[in-house]
């Protein structure tokens, strides 16, 4: 660990070739990790996951605020950023959601270039399948909503789906009547997203403290003043809480209650096989959420365990249901072995929409409530939170996602938030 | 897989049950403020630790009952019929 400014190494073919002459010894640490934090920062960000790091980057890049410290209890990208199924899409129903997630998708499209870091964004398309007449009606409704919202969408019949996705069960129990494709959807290397933002923020001078726990929040006169950590108390003007599943815990330190419940969402991968699935597939009726990683593993998502949990593991019945769904669509996958299984803790809000707002305590901002879909929203979550912190006002896209909606009743009820009914 | 002891049927696998969330949730009077109503609808204790909740033995006897469970490791400390002395004390 060093607090000395380091010479950034560009990632590219030339740098790699040059390193071949000196045993690749020119690479330098990418994180700006001081041995001891400063006594005061303009902004302290709690949570070194995608949303926290993106907020730090956009504070520096968009608003010139660089006296920023990111505090992470574990390690960068070791929380939900490293636990999701890497899917990126913006196939939402309401205009407010479409604006939010399409901002995110647009930023993802330029992210590798903007951050000089290959996040392996692959726009392989995202399919939602329908297996009965009602499912088709819902797809028509979704397709119309997406097109009205200015989001790309294609509706295909059963033959069209089979023409585009080879290997589907020719004689399934649940017939495939059609599918809704968002061509711009896809996947990205999830860890790389965190690392790219961490490096970009580090280059701008942001401090990143790993293995540092937040133990308390101090306030005076209704305003946040400091964050107590395992490395001492850090005073600051503003605090951003971006801690995914544990938002309630951090809010409680400030005496706040959040309209959030924490649930475990599990995923699992098969052993790696040759390329056999070149898209992302979602079939709500059979409980399937499936794609193939660049490494060759089938990445399978399951539904939430519907009892609150902070244990980062899922339960067997839900996993079994997801596996059964996969075999229903692709019987040939039944012989694949599972390589590993894990779960992340999701902040679930009743309307399946996030909370992006300053709380009742002045200067204390929350970026939470993404439920099962936080990864796809990382660039937008960071962009909008940085805007609110820097300007003191919610960005127009973030305004509908404030705390006020729970008392006003202006909910944005996105059942499509995860794509899995809950 | 959790093993949940239904007060009427005894220990059964989790797959037979459905979780009904926090217990108890008291509805405020209808002339309450918007804030109180929002808290009733949306705010839950969501603790990292022991949690009092209701479960439904959906694929068994169909009864609702109270469970005290740790949200950290899913250990079930106690199950009791709704309205029983054990539930009130939990």
Image (cartoon, coloured by chain):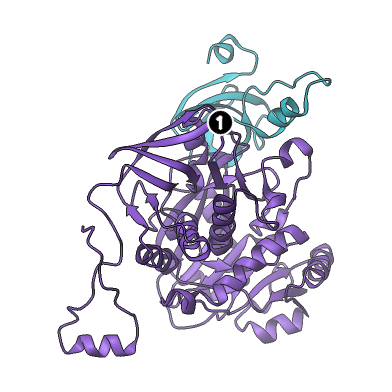
* The one of A387 and A277 positioned closer to us in this rendering: A387
Q: With A27 as the anchor, is B3 left or right in this view? A: right
x, y percentage for residue A351? 71, 46
Q: Nearer the viewer, residue A93 or A229?
A: A229
Chain in purple?
A
Foreground: B31 or A71?
A: A71
Chain colored cyan: B
Residue at figure coordinates x 74%, y 84% from the top left: A160
Query: Is residue A403 positioned above or below A280 on the image?
Result: above
Q: Residue furthest top?
A: B85
Q: Is residue A200 visible?
A: yes
Residue A86 spot, x, y in % from top left: 51, 66
Residue A286 position, x and y percent, is 66, 62
Callout 1: chain: A
Secondary structure beneath disc 1?
loop
Residue in the picture at 34% in, 54% down: A208
Give the labeled residue for mark 1. A256
Would you call the spot at circle 1 few (<14 residues within 10 Å), some (14-19), or many (20 or more)?
few
Q: What percent of the width, then of the height, locates residue A25? A: 17, 78
Q: Residue at x 51, y 41 (%)?
A: A247
User: Residue drawn 61% across and 63% down?
Assistant: A288
* Left or right: B30 as drawn, with respect to A57: right
């Amino acid at each position: 660990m060093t607090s000395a400014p380091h010479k950034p190494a560009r990632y590219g073919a030339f740098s790699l070739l040059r390193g071949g002459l000196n045993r690749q010894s020119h690479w330098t640490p990418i994180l700006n990790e001081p041995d001891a934090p400063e006594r005061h920062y303009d902004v302290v960000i709690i949570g070194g996951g995608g949303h926290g790091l993106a907020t730090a980057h956009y504070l520096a890049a968009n608003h010139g605020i660089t006296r920023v410290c990111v505090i992470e209890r574990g390690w960068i990208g070791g929380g939900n950023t490293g636990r999701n199924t890497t899917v990126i899409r913006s196939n939402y129903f309401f205009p407010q959601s479409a604006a939010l997630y399409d901002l995110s998708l647009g930023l993802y499209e330029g992210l590798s270039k903007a951050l000089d870091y290959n996040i392996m964004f692959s726009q392989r398309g995202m399919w939602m399948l329908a297996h009965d007449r009602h499912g088709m009606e819902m797809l028509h409704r979704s397709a119309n909503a997406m097109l009205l919202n200015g989001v790309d969408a294609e509706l295909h019949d059963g033959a069209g789906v089979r023409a585009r996705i080879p290997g589907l069960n020719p004689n399934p129990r649940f017939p495939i009547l059609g599918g809704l494709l968002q061509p711009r959807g896809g996947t990205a290397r999830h860890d790389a997203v965190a690392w790219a933002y961490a490096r970009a923020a580090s280059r701008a001078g942001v401090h990143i403290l790993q293995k540092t726990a937040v133990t308390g929040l101090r306030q005076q006169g209704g305003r946040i003043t400091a964050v107590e950590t395992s490395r001492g108390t850090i005073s600051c003007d503003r605090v951003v809480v971006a801690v995914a599943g544990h938002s309630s815990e951090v809010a409680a330190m400030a005496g706040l209650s959040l309209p959030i419940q924490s649930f475990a969402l599990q995923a699992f991968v098969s052993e790696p096989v040759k390329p056999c699935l070149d898209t992302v597939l979602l079939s709500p009726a059979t409980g399937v959420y499936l794609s193939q990683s660049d490494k060759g593993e089938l990445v399978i998502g399951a539904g939430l365990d519907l009892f609150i949990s902070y244990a980062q593991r899922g339960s067997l019945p839900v996993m079994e249901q997801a596996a059964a769904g996969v075999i229903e669509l692709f019987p040939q996958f039944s012989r694949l072995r599972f390589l590993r299984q894990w779960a992340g803790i999701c902040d679930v809000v009743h309307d399946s929409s996030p909370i992006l707002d300053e709380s009742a305590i002045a200067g204390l901002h929350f970026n939470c409530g993404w439920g099962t879909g936080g990864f796809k929203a990382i660039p937008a979550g960071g962009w909008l939170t940085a805007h609110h912190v820097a300007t003191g006002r919610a960005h127009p896209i973030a305004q509908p996602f404030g705390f006020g909606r729970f008392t006003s009743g202006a909910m944005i009820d996105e059942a499509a938030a995860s794509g899995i009914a809950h | 897989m959790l093993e949940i002891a239904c007060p009427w049927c005894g220990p059964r696998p989790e797959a037979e049950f459905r979780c009904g969330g926090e217990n108890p949730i008291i509805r405020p009077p209808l002339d309450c403020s918007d804030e109180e109503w929002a808290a009733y609808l949306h705010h839950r204790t969501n603790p990292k630790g022991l949690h009092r909740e209701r479960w439904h033995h959906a694929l068994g006897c169909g009864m609702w009952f109270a469970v005290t469970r740790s949200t950290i490791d899913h250990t079930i400390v106690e199950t009791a019929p709704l309205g029983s002395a054990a539930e009130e004390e939990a």
